[in-house]
Image (cartoon, rainbow, N blue to C red):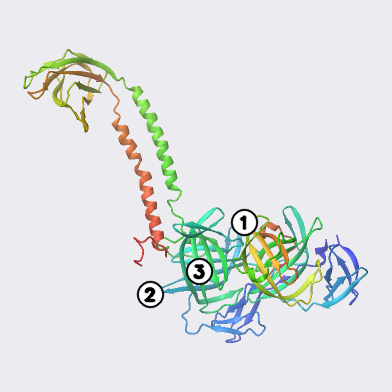
Amino acid sequence: MSAPAGNCPNCGAPIAFRWSSAIQTTCEFCHSILVRTDVDLKKVGEVADLPADASPIQIGTEGVYQNKGFVVIGRIMYEYEQGGWNEWHVVYNDNSNGWLSDAQLEYDLSWLAKPPQPIPLTPTVQPGARFNWNDKNYEATSVTKARYKGVQGELPFEYWDKADVLFADLRTTTGDFATIDYSENPPLLFLGRAVDFDDLHFKNLRLFEGWTS
Amino acid sequence: MSSSLVTPPLVKAKSLSCPNCGAPVELRGFAHTLSAVCPNCLSVLDTSSPELQVLDTFQGKERVQPKIPLGTRGTFNGTVYEVIGFQERSVQSGGDFYSWDEYLLFNPYKGFRYLTEYCGHWNVVRALSRVPETARARGRQAWRLDGRTFAAFDAMTAATSYVIGEFPWQVCRGETVRCEDYISPPYMLSAESTGDEVTWSMGEYWPGSKIWQAFRLAGSPPYAQGVFSNQPSPFAGKIGSAWRTWLWLNVALFVLFLLFTFMKANREVFRQDYVYLSGKSSEAAFVTPPFQLNGGDKNVEVGVHASVDNDWIYLNFALINDETGQTFDFAREVSYYHDSDGTEGSRNNSVVIPSVPGGRYYLRIEPEMSPSSPSTRYEVFVRRDVPIYSYFWIAAMLLLIPPIVVLIRSVKFEGLRWRESDYAPASSGGDD
């Protein structure tokens, strides 16, 4: 499953990729942020210690969604004035990738999508705004200015040292979920579903003192 | 596998010391907790700041004892949740003041739930990851979700008036939130808005006994006063079933009726034409030839058909047993009138005498008409053991009572529910 990709240019520790298409990873030992180039791994930065979080998910957590197994291989952590959330990068057993977000233990699965139409610019996306994508009516539920807090593990793109990031979350009546990431130009659209913890049949979760999963 | 290299780190619960009074503050919500209230001095602490900044103090506020103590664990739909926070939320509108209690429930995997209590009525509430669609109900803006229509029940601005425990958000005393409740019992859809962001949640009504069971609490839950907005009506499912029962009983009654009709002999034992001659004020009584009434104590129908036309005839009867002399006296009037407006009365009339013993009988008939009447033909017949339909009509009427009672009680229950609504019907509103 994991292919060795070389050694950390900073500390020499072996670096293995679980996903062949990963662009970026972090060294578990020295916390260097490493980006894959054609020939080797390049250190581009260093992660500060991630703030303590209480997500039950960790790198290596496995799950199943619609009969497709997945494993968590990386994450981006965000914080905003009402708390924080994790965007867990997951790889499915067909080698495709996606995201599992955990915002105060409310879970959403999403996948990078080709926008069915140009993505609305921020001023038009205010809570309550509606959009019809792929014959589904999405309603914007929140527009959040988030602070990038750090990364961990493998990501499908270079992502580090970000400043504030603007997100819009949208939902439908039947549990469809969409999020727009305005930190890129043009903005990125992710489409997905709200999911229940029990729907994902997790394994290898974190353990909490006094609790059983 | 890869996971065998790393044993999952155990996330430990934390305990802090209140920077204001030094008392220990236990944290049950791990890193989710953004603010916690010191149980000793009621200072609100910012647990996300390393120095535990004191955000607010609830000085001078009377302490509220949560009915379910912090730290209590309960099982809801198979998942264990722990009470980690408690707040009292109050509404002041005009001269009205009321408050309800809100418990924050936590499971480190399944997340947060809320438990609300007002006058002994409980709701288990969960934030929604879906948005409802607009609809209309009861002449107002309503919402549709999961195939249900939620009718507007009330809207208020609620302030946090007391808080204890810990929360995954920054607690602010006096912070106000606009709340709107929409109901489809046993569910309640609530919209909470601060600024332009709306948070939807779905509550499900739970009787206090089930809450006490879920938390294994001692004693009994507070008495539930009145009817709560999304309290399911005990009659909701019963109206339909009452009418279904009514339908089946009617089918049974009809079968019984057929059986009963079939079992009756219903035999004609006598029929004879007579003429009342004009001009006589009253004709002398006469007797019929004898006829046989078979069997034991059974009923007898004596009927008259008279060719009266805008006129009447009065007949005195006596059914006399030829052998024992036992006599049954009765009388029948036949009157029939008609003009351009319609008709009144009938040319037929009959009487059923119950329990006539078997034997040979004859009738003594004494007819009477007005002196001006023309000569009139009339026919008298006697039938033995006839079915009596009126019993079935009475039974059918009695069968209507249970479904109508259920219907009335249901309407009354809904009346009590909506009386508490901000949108109470005009006839019953405004008295509280």
Mark 1 or mark 2, whichever is nearer to me:
1
Q: Nearer the viewer, residue B322 or B124?
A: B124
Q: Residue at x 14, y 26 (%)?
A: B312
Compared across the picture, whether B53 is left or right of B342 comes to: right
Q: Which mark is residue B247?
A: none
**Residue identifier under label 1:** A174
Please identify the quarter of the rendering in which residue A122 is found. bottom right
Alpha-carbon distance for marks 1 and 3?
A: 23 Å
Q: State which quarter of the image contains the N terminus of chain B.
A: bottom right
Say if A60 sits above or below B167 in the image.
above
The residue carrying pointer 1 sits among few (fewer than 14), some (14 to 19) or many (20 or more) residues within 10 Å by Cα, namely: some
Question: Which amino acid is tagged 1?
Answer: Thr
**Residue identifier under label 2:** B95
Asked which secondary structure carries label 2, the reply is: loop
Instruction: Provide residue B426's location: percent of width, then percent of height.
Output: 36, 61
**Residue identifier under label 3:** B179
Question: Which amino acid is tagged 2?
Answer: Gly
Instruction: Provide residue B197's location: percent of width, then percent of height.
Output: 58, 70
